[in-house]
Amino acid sequence: MEESLSKEWQDNKSDPSLSERENPLKLLKSINKTQFITFFVTYLSWTFVSFDYFIVTFTLPYIAKDFKLKPSDVAVSITLMLTFRPLGALIFGLLSDKYGRKYPLMANIFIFSGLQLASGFAPNFLTYSITRAIFGMAMGGEWGLGAALAMEALPLESRGLLSGILQEGYALGFLLAAYQNQKNGKDCMQNVKQLKLIHVKKLGQS
């Protein structure tokens, strides 16, 4: 098997058209409108999931104050979120194999958007922890669904470049969370909620 992989690598290395494929501008120009929308929507989805994950970390003292707990106690909700991510990846992965990528991803977006709102209205810490645990499942399912949908829609030669860009939606979510926390504190969620409905609509049109 190693010999076959080595031979395939050597064949690709000697391909005269490989240098053209490595030009990022040419790769981006090869994408049509539908492919771009699909990629952009999945990128936004991953960014918003990342934003919600990190904003909890930044606003932990505010959340602890609301529930009259220590920040270290509230941090348990983050652990729950991460613990349930693999389960969400498994569930949504099975759904995507059965029903395709697009509709499970749309459902996933609605679920994690609803859970973001529900977290803000949780009457006690137990309810809050449950919503964050279920959000962790949605977070785990989003990456697999979004990455698969985007990569399947894109031209083969552009997948390497754009898969790296897609992953950086996680970093952008962190930067947005840090910026909004510094600017608005615990009210930082208000400026982005409307955008979630917009990119769900775009996904339905793609």
Image (tube, rainbow, N blue to C red):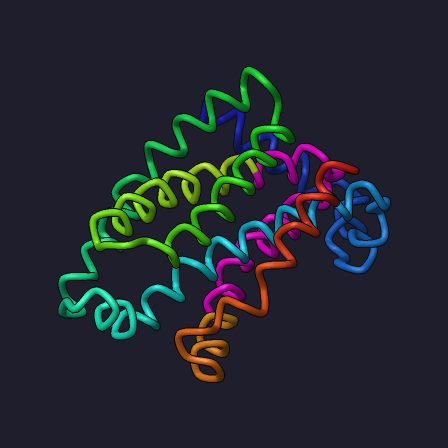
Residue at image coords 60%, 48%: 163
Count of labels in the image: 0
Toward which corner of the image does residue 121 lie, by quadrant?
bottom left
Find residue 87 and report its image quarter: top left
Q: Is residue 57 above or below residue 5?
A: below
Percent coordinates x, y for residue 93 in the rendering: 47, 26
Q: Is residue 164 magenta?
A: yes
Left or right for 151, reference 77 = right
Vertical order, 143 against 55 (above or below): above
When the figure is inspected, residue 151 is found, relative to residue 116, above or below; the finding is above
For this view, does 175 lie left or right of residue 76?
right
Counting from the top left corner in percent of width and height, residue 53 is at 39, 58
Q: Position of residue 33 (x, y in %)?
A: 85, 46
Of 157 and 136, the residue lying toward us? 136
> Residue at the front extreme?
123
* Residue with the most extreme bottom position: 183
Quadrant (top left/top right/bottom left/bottom right) for the C terminus: top right
SS assignment for the magenta stretch, majority: helix
User: Residue drawn at (54%, 24%), measured in percent from left and top?
Assistant: 96
Front residue (pair 159, 166) = 166
Q: Is 145 displayed left or right of 74 in the figure? A: right
Q: Nearer the viewer, residue 43 or 71?
A: 71
First to last magenta residue range? 146-174
At 53% across and 33% down in the image, what residue appears? 6
Q: Is residue 19 magenta?
A: no
Q: Residue furthest top?
A: 98
In the rendered image, residue 158, in percent from the top left (x then y), is placed at 72, 46
Q: Residue at x 43, y 77 (%)?
A: 181
